[in-house]
Amino acid sequence: MKEPALLFKGFTHLFKSHIEQKQITLEVPFHTKGPPELVEKVKERGLKIEVNLVYQILYNVFFNACKFNKQEGSIEMGIEILEFSEEGKAKLLIEVKDTGIGMDKAQKNKLFKLFETVRQD
């Protein structure tokens, strides 16, 4: 993958009805941020990532950002290259910011535990 920001491509269509129904403003990057030399290396050599796994994670995060967002809220997505090694390994920062209802401290502690669900219907 030579342009990591393309991971976000398609979310606007997948969640079009949620976005339109709640009148959510959506910012999706078309280019990856980061130091120019790292961005250029990635464009030249590409990233080896588990696209399906990363896409599923982003799908879940984006779904929750839509579902729990407020009317006329917003969602901003971004991706930045922090490190890129000669072996082709990269450290990426993927951000999804939204104006949703948020989570309290107890819910945040459960966030990455296996088989845990934080419900706020």
Image (cartoon, rainbow, N blue to C red):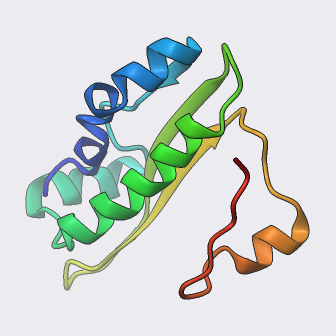
Which residue lies at the image location 32% right of the left edge and 62% below the top edge? 56
Which residue lies at the image location 38% right of the left edge and 32% below the top edge? 29
Q: Find residue 46 and report its horizontal and vertical position in percent.
A: 13, 62
* Left or right: 24, with 46 as reference point: right
Quarter location, residue 83: bottom left
Which residue lies at the image location 45% right of the left edge and 52% below the top edge? 80
Task: Give the vertical position of 44 relative to 74 (above or below).
Answer: below
* Left or right: 8, with 19 as reference point: left
Q: Find residue 19 and report its horizontal and vertical position in percent.
A: 47, 21
For the N terminus, the quadrant is: bottom left
Task: Give the vertical position of 2 relative to 51 (above or below).
Answer: above
Figure disc tally: 0
Residue 25 versus residue 4: which sits nearer the camera? 25
Residue 9 versus residue 41: which sits nearer the camera? 9
Q: Residue furthest right?
A: 105
Which residue lies at the image location 47% right of the left edge and 45% below the top edge? 62
* Left or right: 95, with 111 as reference point: left
Residue 6 versus residue 15: which sits nearer the camera? 15
